[in-house]
Structure formats: C-alpha cells, structure tokens
Image: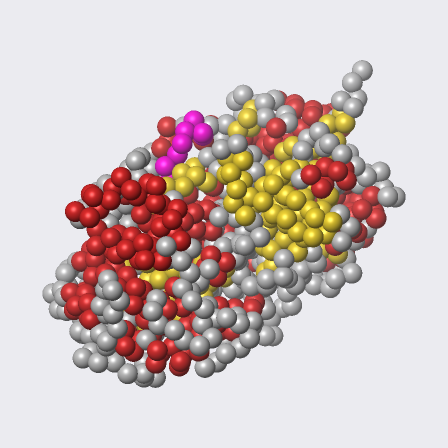
C-alpha cells in the first residue's frame, strides 16, 4: 500500500499483445500500457501527465449492439432485475411513441415541444449551439416519460429525479496532492444537486432568469425545502422552474460526487453550414439502423478530414526486437513516446469546444513546492472526444468509494454512443441516431429515470456520513465469527491513498475504525487501514495467499513478524463479467474483477527512512521475500509502496506488504490477465519486447533486482524521509514511460553511474548502491556471453534453472560483495 504521492502498485489492462496461436507459451504476464501505468502516481506525476495514457485504455474498448445495451439498462430498471425479460425493449419502444409523436403532455409540459427543440438542434452552427436545444428536449421528455407506465418497470425515483444540466464550466477535484480541472459539456445529476449552485445563502436562487412567482415564494422556499422533496407536485414545479431558468445556465463548482453521467458533444464539421436531417413527421417502432460509423474508435476523425468514414483501431503491434547493448543488458530500440499505440490522442480530432475552452488541467496545490509543478499552461491538450470522456469517467470513479460502473454519452451531430466503464474495461454500444430513431433515445431516458443510485453504479454498501464535519463512509455487515462488523472509513483523511484511472485494481487505502474489531484485537496503537480494490477473479485471492504466508511464518523467523497483519476481510459478489455476458461481449470472464475490502494493522512506508535504518528494513524485507519464494510464495511486485515497517521495543521491523499480485508455486503458469510488477522497479529483463509478449519467465533474480531499484529510488529521491522537490529529484519519467522506454532509461542510469556520489547524498550509501548495480551488470554480462558459448537449452537456461533452485546463491553475490560488507560492517 503506497504512501500518498509516491509509487504504488500499478494496475494493468488485458494482454493486448499476447502471442497468437503457435507462438511461445506465456511465461509471465506482460506489463501494462496506458493510463494504468501512472494511475496511482498522481501525487508524483500529476493529472495532466496521466491523461496522455488514457487513449491506450480507450483503444481496448469492447463493443456491443445498441439494443443489447438498452435491454440491459431496462433490465436494471425493472421490478425483477435478476430475471431475464427479453420483451422489455419492444414493450418500451411502443410505450414511448406518444412522447415521440407529440401526443403526451403533463400539467407543466407538452411533448410536442421536443420536436421544436430538435428542429432547433439540427440547424447549422457551432458546437455550443447544440447544448440548449438538447437539454430542453431531454428534460421535456423526462417530464413526459414520468407519466408513462410499462408493466414490469419500476416507477421513476423522486429521490434521484435526474435532470440534464448544462455545465461547460470548470469542475475541480483533488487527487493526492494534485488538483484536476475538467469541463464536461453537459451532465446528468439529481435535481437537488443541479439546483444547489444557483441557491444563495438564504435559500433563494441566483443567476439565470427569475419568474415573478419565484420572487414571491423566495421567503418560503427555505422552510419548505424538505417538504418539497416529499410533495410530488412541488417537486415537479421545482423541476419546471429549473428547466425554464437554470438548466441551460452555467453552474459554478458542481461537485464530481453528484454527477451521474457526462455528455460530451462534437460537431463532425466545426461551424458547418449544412444542417442535420430534421425530425420525422411521426415515429413508429422500427428495427435498429446502424449509424456511420457504427462504433467510435479513438481516432475516428482527423483534424484535416471533417467527415471521413469509420476506421478501425489496428491491433497493437509488439514492440520491436531488442538491441543488445555492450553491458549484456538489453533494451528495445527507441520508440516514439514509449507507446505502441497507433497514434497519439493529440493527433486526433478533439471535442471542438475544447479548442476554445481554457482548461486549468492539473493545477498543483503547491504540495510539491515547486514552481515548475505549476508550469503547465492553462490550455487543455487536444484530446480525442473518447479520451476526454474517459477522463470524466476517471473523475467520477475517484469521487465516490467503491464505484461499480459508470455511464457516459458521446454525441456527434445526431448520433450518440453510450460508453460503459468498469474496472474490467470499457464497452461502447453502437451508435443511436437520436433524431431519426427518437424512440430509442426515449427508451434510454425512460430506463435511466428509473435508476436508483446503485443502478447508476454507486456502491450501496458504503454509506456516506458526516463525522465531526468530515466526510466518512460506513460499512456494516454480518460476520459469522464476530457478529455485526462495523467499519467507519475516514475517506477525507489526509493519509488516504486514492486511485485515478479507468481500469485495473483501483486500490484505495483508507484509515478505518471499528468497534467490533477493537473489541477483538484491543486498542491497536498504530491504528488500522482498509484496503479496497478490484482483484482479478481468476487470481488466487490475497487472503488465501496470506493464509499460506502465515503458515510459513510459523516455522521461519525471517518471515515471522515481517508480514502484514490481516485483521478481517470481505469479498463482494459482484463480478464485472456479468454485464459482459448480458451484452454478448466475447470472452466476458477474461479479466473479470471482484471487489475486496481487507483490514490491516497500520504500517509506515519505507520512504520515511534513511541511512542505516533504511538499509536494515530493506534487508529484512529481502530476507522475508527469499524465504517465501523458497517456500512457494512468489511476491512479484517489489516496490517502495510494498515495503513497510513498524516499531517494536525501539527496533524497526520490516514488513513485505501487498500480496494481491502474488502467486503460489503449485499454480502452473501466470494467473489472471494483469501484469505482475511495478514498471519503474521491474528487472530490465522484464522491460523488453520479448517480456512484453509474455515470453520471459519471472524468476527470483528479477524480484531481487527490483529491491535494488527500490533502494536507488528512495536514496536519490528523498532526503531524511522527505520527497525532494521535482527539480531536484530524478526518475519521474520512469513512472510515466512505457515498459520498454523505462528499461532504456534504467539501463542508461546503470551505464553512467560514477564513483563520486551525487551532490547532497551519503557517500557510503552511494558506494553500496554502485556495488549492487555492478553485481547486476556483471551477472547480466555473464548470462549474455554464456548464451553465445552454450546452446540455448543448456547454457544460460541452465543457469536460470540453477538460480531458481538455489536463490540464496544469487543473493549471496550481493551480500558477499565488497560494497555490501563494507556498508554492513558491525560497529566496533
């Protein structure tokens, strides 16, 4: 579990570049690409830097048919969501026709105004002209759809009362020490949340146009606010007032935690002079007609080509073959930008509005105390609309705890695409022409209007509460042994470690208190933390691995007291594969994830230590690691965030932490679909093209090499346990580079090390570190030359097999080196 602001374990997308049939068998899980590489390093690299990798995640989007998505959403809005009801879509398409054809009305609105708004929408003009008519059409439709009843579907949800609201204003959010600012065009959110920015301190309204009735009732609104939510007529009147005044106004400071969905617009041709096909005179139930393009690839349009046909994202190509360097260590040929993606997001057509918007994207709160941290200009990069919408999804994930999934909508002219995000990946449905196929748009609104907050993806088990003015979350569950387990998660605590990204484990670490656990374990002096993450369903769970680790600790002192103390855990029964099965996505179980919550005794990060204390804790973790390896537990993710410590009787005790990516020796082959290793600390052998294809077996020496990189990282980036300012610390770009480019940078570091210690560092520690890397370099040279002297099946391979059988022999190359012995010499 990583300290805020520094590197933790990095999540990973599916193996996009795994070998095809007939290629070498998978020996290890390849490394990640895209936003996952930096998603948990926000305090280190900043939000803007992480945004550049999102297009790699978007490229892996899965596809489903629009009718399958609508059917799945209706199923969730039904009275029996667990029961398959294939007839729901057809029933709803028929039921909404009166709304589509202007034949429905309420006391406050009439559906014929939908066509009026859509006729305004199709006129020529710039993107911003889309917003107001789309909002009016949507909100009028919602008011009319509220009166439509379909057997088997739930009633609308007054507690949510979704409404479409213009935004196009900066929305900020804190991520560790960094602040992001985004500007979604439109948002869907609860009515009360939409009204809140327009309320003044006395409960009246500000901004927008005011009716005389609003002025007369201004004094009464404060007293009636709670009653309004219960009184259906007052609620509808409040809704109509907001529709007429502020739904198309720009609110200030909408909080991300209230956003249910974002809608991002783009004109296929900015400033086009030709209009869009107008609404039909009347609508009937028709079969789905594919749009052009039917699906949106990341680079669906080019800046210079305003209206091309659909293009498909090419399959990711494996990185180029490695080039042998003089040291015997290898690195790939230089790649452009460190990514194998076909084209950067900056080469694609961004949302047209973003050209004129000034986005303060990645503002720094000054926690990193560097002028150059604030040096990013205020202009948002030209991001493809799919990437832009993905960034909104990342904000929505980060704003609430344990979010299960999200929906966003992309609109290009008269076509909309629904994008579904969860921690397994992204799914987009085929396009819906919401003007020519208005009934399907109405069905989408009909389903969403009947969503409770959990149907929007909010986790119903984590209940937001206020404790002493601070935002917290409660979680209570019946436990067979303890009875009712009560957890109070301090989600506003400064020590919370958050996640910023779209897919992967999305680990959050939160300080937690619990009366039930305090009763069982007594008063834990250092406190407790909750680790909440989405683990791969196919991988041996962390609690199972820790059971094995505890058995080993009973007979090995190098493990005893050096492992995390798991106090309690729970596995949620909500696999991400379920929606993929419903949507007909191929291989729905591949990479499926489930949510875990684990409670541990709180530990301290190794990055707080320096000098001999740093070495002692680090070496204790090495000894624990090698014992576990020999006993069949392979950690495979050595990083600063996974090396922890606590104090006992004045002595520092090192702890090898985080086993959610570990594996057991009795499991053949790599488990799961997620890489094992954190890029900046992975062995150079694992940062090659061959390794990225899964053709390099993960060996003990790779983990031991990771320990060396961890020591270098801490030694050169911290002083007295404090992270150096950005201008003074090296290696930031290791965390933001792709695996192969990172390998090149690390190899360059080894090849340019000097005898003289860098300015401001401990010369004895530097000599120790240089000695460790000389051992690594000599070992790599030996294996390199041996590969030429002996056949591949008996030379270097035999050496690797020997290292696996006798890992102590490899460790002793370091512990017997002159630099190690000199530094670890007992005091006289």
Residue 82 image offset from top left, x and y in percent: 56, 71
Above or below, 513 relative to 503: above
Q: Nearer the viewer, residue 435 or 722?
A: 435
Query: What residue is at 65 percent from the left and 68 percent from the top?
Result: 25
- Give the overall secondary structure of the magenta segment: loop
- The picture quadrant where one finds residue 221 is top left
In what quadrant of the picture does the C terminus appear?
Answer: top right
Residue range (magenta)? 361-369
Q: Which of 462 and 340 is in front in this view?
A: 462
Query: What residue is at 64 percent from the left and 65 percent from the top?
Result: 26
Residue 378 visible in image: no
Which residue lies most toward the right here? 555
- The picture quadrant where one finds residue 607 is top right
Q: How many numbered marks appear?
A: 0
Q: Which of 406 and 295 is in front in this view?
A: 406
Query: What residue is at 40 percent from the left and 38 percent from the top?
Result: 179
Residue 554 image offset from top left, x and y in percent: 86, 43
Which residue lies most toward the left here? 273
Q: Is residue 491 left or right of residue 616?
A: left
Q: Is residue 661 left or right of residue 521?
A: left
Residue 281 visible in image: yes
Residue 78 image offset from top left, x and y in percent: 48, 71
Query: What residue is at 25 percent from the left and 41 percent from the top?
Result: 218
Q: Is residue 615 left or right of residue 163?
A: right
The stretch drawn in magenta includes residue 363: yes
């Amino acid at each position: 579990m990583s300290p805020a602001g520094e590197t933790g374990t990095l999540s990973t997308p599916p193996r996009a570049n795994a070998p095809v049939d007939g290629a070498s068998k998978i020996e290890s899980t390849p490394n990640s690409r895209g936003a996952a590489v930096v998603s948990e390093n926000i305090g280190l690299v900043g939000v803007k830097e992480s945004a550049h990798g999102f297009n790699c995640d978007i490229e892996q989007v899965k596809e489903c048919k629009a009718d399958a998505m609508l059917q799945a959403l209706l199923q969730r809005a039904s009275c029996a969501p667990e029961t398959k009801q294939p007839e729901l879509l057809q029933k709803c398409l028929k039921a909404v026709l009166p709304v589509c054809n202007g034949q429905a009305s309420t006391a406050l609105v009439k559906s014929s105004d939908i066509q009026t708004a859509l006729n305004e929408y199709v006129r020529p003009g710039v993107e911003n002209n889309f917003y107001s008519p789309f909002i009016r059409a949507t909100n009028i439709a919602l008011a009319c759809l509220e009166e439509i009843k379909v057997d088997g579907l739930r009633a609308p949800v007054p507690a949510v009362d979704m409404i479409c609201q213009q935004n196009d204003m900066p929305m900020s959010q804190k991520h560790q020490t960094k602040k992001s600012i985004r500007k979604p065009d439109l948002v869907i959110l609860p009515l009360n949340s939409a009204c809140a920015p327009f309320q003044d301190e006395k409960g009246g309204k500000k901004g927008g146009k005011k009716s005389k009735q609003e002025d007369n009732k201004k004094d009464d609104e404060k007293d009636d606010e709670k009653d309004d939510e219960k009184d259906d007529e007052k609620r509808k009147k409040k809704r109509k007032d907001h529709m007429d005044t502020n739904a198309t106004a720009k609110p200030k400071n909408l909080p991300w935690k209230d956003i249910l969905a974002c809608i991002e617009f783009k004109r296929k041709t900015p400033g086009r002079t030709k209009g869009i096909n107008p609404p039909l005179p009347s609508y009937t139930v028709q079969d789905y007609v594919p749009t052009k393009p039917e699906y949106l690839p990341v680079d669906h349009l080019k800046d210079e080509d305003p209206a091309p046909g659909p293009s498909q994202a090419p399959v990711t190509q494996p990185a180029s073959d490695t080039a042998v360097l003089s040291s015997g260590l290898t690195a790939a040929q230089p790649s452009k930008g460190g990514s194998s993606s076909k084209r950067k997001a900056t080469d694609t057509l961004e949302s047209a509005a973003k050209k004129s918007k000034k986005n303060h994207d990645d503002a720094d709160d000054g926690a990193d105390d560097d002028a150059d941290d604030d040096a990013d200009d205020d202009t948002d990069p030209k991001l493809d609309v799919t990437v832009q919408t993905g960034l909104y999804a990342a904000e929505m994930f980060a704003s609430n705890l344990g979010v299960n999934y999200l929906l966003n909508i992309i609109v290009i002219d008269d076509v909309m695409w629904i994008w579904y995000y969860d921690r397994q990946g992204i799914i987009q449905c085929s396009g819906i022409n919401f003007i020519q196929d208005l009934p399907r748009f109405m069905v989408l609104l009909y389903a969403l209007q009947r969503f409770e907050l959990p149907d929007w993806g909010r986790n119903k088990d984590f209940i937001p509460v206020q404790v002493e003015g601070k935002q917290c979350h409660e979680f209570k569950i019946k436990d067979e042994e303890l009875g009712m387990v009560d957890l109070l998660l301090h989600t506003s605590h400064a020590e919370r470690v958050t996640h910023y990204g779209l897919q992967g484990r999305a680990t959050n670490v939160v300080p937690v208190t619990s009366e039930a656990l305090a009763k069982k374990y007594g008063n834990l002096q250092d406190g407790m933390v909750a680790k909440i993450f989405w683990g791969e369903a196919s991988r041996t769970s962390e609690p199972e691995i820790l059971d094995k680790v505890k058995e080993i600790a009973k007979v090995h002192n190098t493990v005893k007291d050096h492992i995390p103390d798991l106090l309690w855990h729970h596995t949620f029964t909500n696999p991400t594969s379920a929606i993929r099965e419903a949507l007909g996505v191929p291989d729905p179980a591949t990479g499926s994830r489930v949510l875990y919550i684990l409670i541990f005794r709180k530990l301290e990060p190794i990055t707080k230590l320096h000098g001999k204390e740093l070495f002692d804790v680090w070496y204790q973790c090495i000894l624990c690691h090698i014992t576990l390896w020999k006993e069949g537990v392979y950690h495979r993710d050595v990083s600063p965030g996974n090396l922890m410590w606590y104090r006992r009787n004045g002595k520092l005790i090192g702890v090898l932490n985080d086993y959610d990516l570990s594996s057991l020796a009795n499991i053949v082959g790599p488990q799961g679909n997620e890489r094992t290793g954190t890029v900046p600390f992975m062995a150079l052998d694992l940062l090659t093209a061959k390794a990225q294809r899964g053709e390099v077996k993960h060996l003990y020496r790779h983990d031991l090499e990771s320990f060396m990189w961890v020591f270098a990282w801490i030694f050169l980036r911290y002083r007295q346990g404090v992270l150096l300012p950005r201008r003074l610390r090296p290696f930031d770009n290791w965390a933001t580079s792709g695996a192969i480019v990172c390998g090149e940078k690390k190899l360059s570091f080894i090849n340019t090390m000097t005898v003289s210690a860098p300015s401001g560092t401990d010369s004895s520690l530097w000599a120790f570190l240089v000695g460790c890397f000389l051992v690594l370099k000599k070992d790599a040279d030996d294996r390199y030359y041996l590969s030429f002297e002996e056949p591949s099946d008996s030379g270097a391979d035999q050496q690797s097999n020997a290292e696996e059988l006798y890992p102590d022999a490899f460790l002793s190359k370091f512990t017997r080196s002159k630099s190690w012995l000199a530094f670890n010499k007992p005091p006289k």
